């Protein structure tokens, strides 16, 4: 097993990795910016090192500072978490060159799958169905317009190196191609330093289904079932659940086999996620593969009982997976709600601030992953995610009821969050019946926000 791991990240994922390492007897080195001097991950690690100013480019994205910290502290591995440098092939290569194990796939594999156009080609070769679109990069708005005319509108222009909905624009008419291409490319360059674009036919009102996979250096690749991530706002996931009510056993088997085939074709080692869209007619299509641990990985952990971060550490140490495909037996139902420091009533404006009071829900089947504590300052420099509330229960309806109760117990004072919106989603009839798709919030948001305002007003009147 590894001896000492540098965690090249912050927040709840850094805390999550530290806890897994401690249970395995692995020492941890946390890194922090000047804005995170009092952050929980810096307090829980075996050792903590400051690597730069608050701006991410000067700290958590500073490869030289991270590698220097890892080598100076005697680490033998680096865990990138998610975001930041987790899917940066250059960083993976530099870790390997410095004699450090990058806990994730190799730089070559990240390049192969990190480019969405290249991943699309690989998926075709592996026999996975793909959305109609460009066979490679689209080099100009003119070329995008010509191709869109062939596959039919609406289409999506997407950054090859993109993620999280960034570098992506929907185009409904030919005259919109030029402006959309320029905007998507500019955002891609700003966010990822790579302006390569590709184009796909937009599947209207699909489900967003992702399969968790794990691979080891012995050539074993397995999947751990699916997560339904269709409750999204501007392609940012808000609620995830497993299993998906949209999949029967036949479809689940076919999608799982396609996910494993893509990962094997790439020579994948580590934790990853193969993402699909599922159209209303039951057809599914590969869209991308994320070469890292996902924000929503605890959903899979709850239904399978498998600790994915510990499995990452095992695989990075050269050990085989601790389970086979036949031993993956999902049980019950799990739901995750992402809690962000943002104001849904103000177009989800980020709302950093001091955590004046905090109460974390508990009880049977409740898990909360967070780096919050009373007095903690949520920084304006980083992502607004402050907690992940998860529940597990024997059935989906029981899980929904448990999530309602957990969100009612959750108290975060000092700044607005989206917790009330998540709570209202748990009561929405279409969500409860499982009859939703990626356009759910587009059509329901205003009604849900009005309900939230009414609830707040009634609460104020009662307290008054």
Image (cartoon, rainbow, N blue to C red):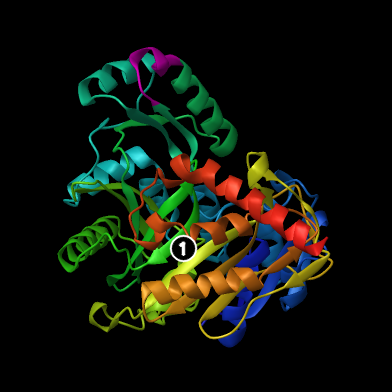
**Where is residue 200 drawn, in percent x and y?**
30, 33
Q: Is residue 220 left or right of residue 52?
A: left
Q: Position of residue 175 (x, y in %)?
A: 38, 12
| Residue 404 seen by the camera | yes
Quarter of the picture containing the C terminus is: bottom right
> Residue at the spot x=52%, y=49% of the render?
88
Q: Mark 1 = which residue?
A: 104
Q: Evaluate whether residue 312 shows in this view.
A: no
Seen at 77% across and 66% down, the residue is 39
Closer to the camera, 399 or 136?
399
Q: Quadrant of residue 15?
A: bottom right
Examine the structure image and report whether residue 145 is included in the region drawn in magenta. no
x and y percentages locating residue 138 in the rendered image: 35, 25
Residue span colored magenta: 171-178
Residue 436 to residue 325: above or below: above
Front-lying residue, 167 or 93? 167
Q: Main secondary structure of the magenta part?
A: helix
Q: Residue at x 54, y 41 (%)?
A: 446
Q: Residues within 10 Å of mark 1 (few under 14, many from 20)?
A: many
């Amino acid at each position: 097993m590894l001896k000492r791991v540098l965690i090249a990240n912050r927040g709840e994922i850094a805390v999550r990795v530290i806890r897994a390492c401690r249970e395995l007897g692995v020492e941890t080195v946390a890194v922090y910016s000047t804005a995170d001097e009092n952050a929980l991950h810096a307090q829980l690690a075996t050792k903590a090192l400051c690597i730069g100013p608050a701006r991410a480019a000067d700290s958590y994205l500073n490869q030289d500072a991270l590698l220097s910290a890892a080598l100076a502290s005697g680490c033998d591995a680096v865990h990138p978490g998610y975001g930041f440098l987790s899917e940066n092939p250059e960083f993976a290569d530099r870790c390997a060159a410095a004699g450090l194990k990058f806990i994730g796939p190799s730089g070559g594999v990240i390049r192969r799958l990190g480019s969405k156009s290249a991943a699309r080609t690989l998926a075709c070769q592996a026999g996975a169905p793909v959305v109609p679109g460009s066979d490679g990069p689209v080099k100009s708005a003119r070329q995008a317009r010509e191709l869109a005319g062939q596959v039919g509108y609406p289409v999506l222009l997407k950054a090859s190196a993109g993620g999280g909905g960034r570098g992506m624009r929907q185009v409904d008419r030919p005259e919109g191609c030029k402006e959309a291409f320029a905007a998507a490319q500019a955002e891609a360059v700003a966010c990822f330093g790579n302006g390569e674009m590709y184009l796909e036919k937009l599947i209207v009102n699909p489900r967003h289904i992702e399969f968790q996979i794990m691979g080891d250096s012995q050539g074993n690749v397995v999947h751990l079932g699916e997560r339904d991530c269709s409750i999204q706002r501007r392609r940012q996931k808000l609620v995830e659940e497993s299993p998906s009510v949209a999949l029967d056993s036949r479809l689940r088997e076919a999608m799982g086999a396609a996910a494993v085939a893509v990962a094997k074709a790439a020579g994948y080692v580590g934790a990853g996620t193969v993402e699909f869209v599922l159209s209303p007619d039951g057809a599914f299509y590969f869209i991308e593969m994320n070469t890292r641990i996902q924000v929503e990985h605890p959903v899979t952990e709850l239904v399978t009982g498998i600790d994915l971060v510990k499995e990452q550490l095992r695989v990075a140490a050269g050990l085989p997976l601790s389970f086979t495909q036949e031993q993956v037996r999902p049980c019950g139902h799990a739901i995750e709600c992402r809690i962000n420091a943002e104001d849904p009533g103000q177009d989800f404006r980020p709302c950093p601030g001091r955590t004046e009071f905090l109460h974390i829900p508990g009880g049977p089947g409740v898990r909360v992953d967070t780096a919050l504590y009373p007095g903690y300052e949520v920084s304006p420099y980083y992502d607004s995610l402050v907690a992940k509330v998860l529940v597990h229960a024997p059935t989906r309806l029981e899980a929904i009821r448990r999530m309602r109760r957990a969100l009612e117990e959750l108290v975060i004072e000092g700044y607005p969050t989206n917790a009330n919106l998540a709570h209202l989603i748990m009561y929405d009839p279409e969500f409860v019946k499982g009859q939703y798709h990626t356009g759910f919030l587009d059509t329901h948001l205003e009604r849900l926000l009005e309900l939230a305002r009414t609830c707040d007003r009634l609460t104020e009147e009662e307290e008054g």
